[in-house]
Image (spheres, rainbow, N blue to C red):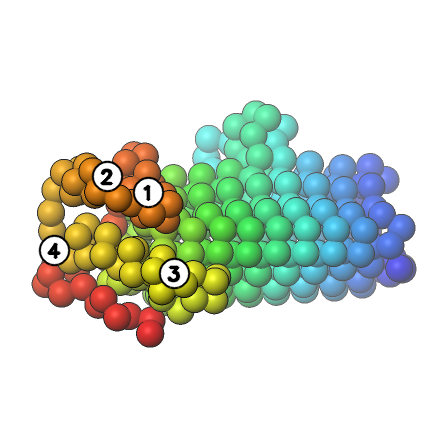
Amino acid sequence: MPIHPTALIDPRADIHSEADIGPYVVIDGPVRIGRKTKILAHAVLTGNTDIGTENEIHMGAVIGHVPQDLAYNGAPTALIIGHRNIIREHSQIHRGTKEGSATIIGDDNFLMHHSHVAHNCQIGNHTIIAGGALLAGYVQVEDRAFVSGNCVVHQFVRIGTLAILRGLSRTSRDVPPFCIMDGTHTVRGINIVGLRRAGFDRERIRALRHAFMRLFHQRVNLRRVVEELRQESCTADVTYLLDFIQQSTRGVCFGPKSGQAEEELGE
């Protein structure tokens, strides 16, 4: 595929012969671009950035720029992007901040317009980061999570698999897998629609519902309830949820103050 004659390409760049580089694209530095990846007009790719195959990077995106971190001292860091990702208009993905570190994006993710992925984030596979969502440094987003429009995620927060953050929500605490979060790190129920789309059957969903209600229906001592649930016969999904909670260093989201969790949310 062609490299448009108006594109500015650093001689250190390594661009696959089947990549497509659009008009006025700037590639500055040892950027590597894989087979059938498309870079659309006015995108800027820079730094030690490795982009896999069949990605789409849309107009005005800034990929691999220096982190917005006052601690960054110019050390060599990286950005690694996998395969088949769609990165829409004016999104920003920054490389790592500490020497030898990297920001890592997996496969088949969809980053909508003006989304921001800061230094050292780790994003899994099949996630959606909607328009205007802001991920601060070192955030981890597990597979199939959905961060809705204009959400704000504090640094070092983890977002569990198949969790969904409702639009305009914000969190400085870890978001448990399979849950729906809104407001200020408040979980309301199980992401039933997302679970069904991922192929979860009724028994798996029922077990997660039961665990969620025990954990978040009212304010409880989470450590005690986790241990109680572990003494019962847990499914693999519930065990994953309990492990996520126990591994949290920031603490996990709260249930609603009213004690009225929206158990049927998403149906």
The quadrant of the picture occupied by the N terminus is bottom right
Q: Which is closer to the viewer, label 4 or label 3? A: 4
Mark 4 vs mark 3, CA separation in Å: 20 Å
- State how far apart marks 1 and 3 are (Cα): 19 Å
Going from N to C along the chain, the mark reached first, 2 or 4, is 4
Percent position of residue 142, x then y? 46, 48
Amino acid bearing label 4: Gln
In the rendered image, which quarter is residue 111 located in? bottom right
Precedes in sequence: disc 1 or disc 3: 3
**Mark 3 secondary-structure assignment:** strand
Report which residue position mark 2 lands on: 230
- Whether residues under marks 2 and 1 lie with C-beta atoms below 8 angstroms apart, the answer is yes
- What residue did someone put label 3 on? 164
Q: Disc 2 to disc 4, how far (Cα)? A: 19 Å
**Pointer 4: what residue?**
218
Pick whichever, 122 or 230, lies toward us.
230
Q: Residue at x 28, y 36 (%)?
A: 246
Q: Which residue is mark 1?
A: 239
Quadrant of the image for the C terminus? bottom left
Q: Which badge, 2 or 1, comes first in the chain's sequence?
A: 2
Residue 136: x and y in percent read: 43, 46
- The residue drawn where x is 68% and y is 64% is 59
Mark pair 1, 4: CA separation: 20 Å
> Residue lying farthest bottom?
267
Residue 90 image offset from top left, x and y in percent: 59, 61
The secondary element bearing badge 1 is classed as helix
Q: Name which residue type carries label 2.
A: Arg
Q: Secondary structure at mark 4?
A: loop
